[in-house]
Image: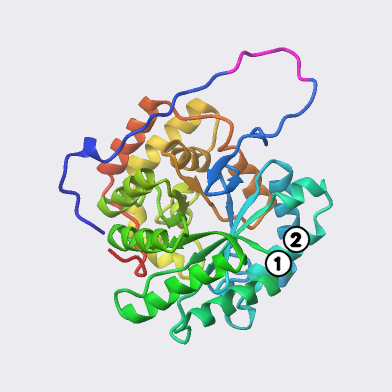
Amino acid sequence: MACLTIKATAYFSSSSSEISLPSSPFKPFNLPPFWPWQKVKVGPLSVSPMGFGTWAWGNQLLWGYQESMDSELQRTFNLAVDNGINLFDTADSYGTGRLNGKSEKLLGKFIRDYQGQKRVQKDIVIATKFAAYPWRLTPGQFVNACNASIDRMQIEQIGIGQLHWSTANYNPLQEAALWDGLVAMYDKGLVRAVGVSNYGPKQLLKIHDYLKARGVPLCSAQVQFSLLSVGEDQLEIKNICDSLGIRLIAYSPLGLGMLTGKYTPSNLPRGPRSFLFRQILPGLEPLLTSLKEIAQKRSKTVPQVAINWCISKGTIPIPGVKTVKQAEENLGALGWRLSSQELLQLEDAARESPGKMIQNIFQTR
């Protein structure tokens, strides 16, 4: 984790304003938690201000996936789409062992089986990430990976094709080939837009300039971004995105669950996450206390406040979902905004909390 060496006031900024609606004794029909016609732009695409991540779909090791969960996952997907969510993030590497690619397969199936309006179904945007496996050494192999994802999902075109991580730190020659692969899949019409994931500020600038010279706009940059993981690099990435018109997609907006308020040092999740939680949770008391205070005042939940902070900072958070209950709770992060004072309170508490999320080892400088 980068050391914080500049003044705290330089770390956080917000132009958000709190919106309130007049109360009414009449309730003629139930509105979704967020107006479905509100969208944000990611290059040529219009997407919901929050998407859902599907890392858990097919992941047995970290998230305990079982095939018996598929019907619940379908209901979760349907609920999200019915309430205006049209951005779903996945990857060709999601799914453990024999289940590799399972997340993409499930997502494609859920779209095909969706029983709602065809217009809504057609507007769904899939953002998938292509792994920089060591055997993907040529642009053609990266294009083949894109075609394989299209086949798994049984769709005609991917919304956002993303390079999952940079190889610049250990194989710069492969990096150049992968960039050419992004250009090729865009030129062939296999993807509507291209993005990157886990790119630090220096490499982000390099690939932006490279793609621009090839006539390909870089539309999105996906990084770990939350109240638990905002350091110098993340804020520099955000500033670069804002200046270049790149949309920042915030993965792990709940810090793998540490910002849900559901866990304590004596109540840890099962599996490998418990080791990380045991190290970080004891240092989160100031932040979790502030999240709980604002949640109580707002009649919201702690996860809703944490996700709304990401939205208020101008990012598109993609919290992971496995159940209808999780989707319902996450949807409650939409349709309102934290006030500037609440944002400052949370950011002050984050600085006072010694616990910080460990940075993804794949993120470059």
Give how far across and how far down residue 229 sits, in percent.
35, 52
Q: Is residue 132 visible?
A: yes
Give how far across and how far down residue 307 sits, in percent.
49, 43
Examine the rendered structure and indicate whether residue 75 appears above or below residue 362. above
Q: Secondary structure at mark 1?
A: helix
Magenta span contains residue 357: no
Q: Name the residue: 80% across, 55% down.
A: 114
Q: Is residue 352 left or right of residue 296?
A: left
Magenta residues?
Answer: 21-27
Examine the rendered structure and indicate whether residue 261 appears above or below residue 181. above
Quarter-of-image position of residue 94: bottom right
Residue type, mark 2 in image: Phe
**Of helix, strand and loop, which mostly describes the magenta segment?**
loop
Q: Name the residue: 29% across, 50% down.
A: 236
Question: Contact (CB < 8 A) between labels 2 and 1?
Answer: yes
Q: Depth check: 335 or 173 in front?
A: 173
In the image as oriented, which residue stretches furthest toward the bottom? 135
Residue type, mark 1 in image: Leu
Q: Residues within 10 Å of mark 2 (few under 14, many from 20)?
A: many
Q: Secondary structure at mark 2?
A: helix
Disc on res. 110: 2
Q: Is residue 85 left or right of residue 225?
A: right
Q: Is residue 171 left or right of residue 129?
A: left
Q: Is residue 252 visible?
A: no
The residue to which callout 1 is attached is 106
Give how far across and how far down residue 262 sits, in percent.
50, 49
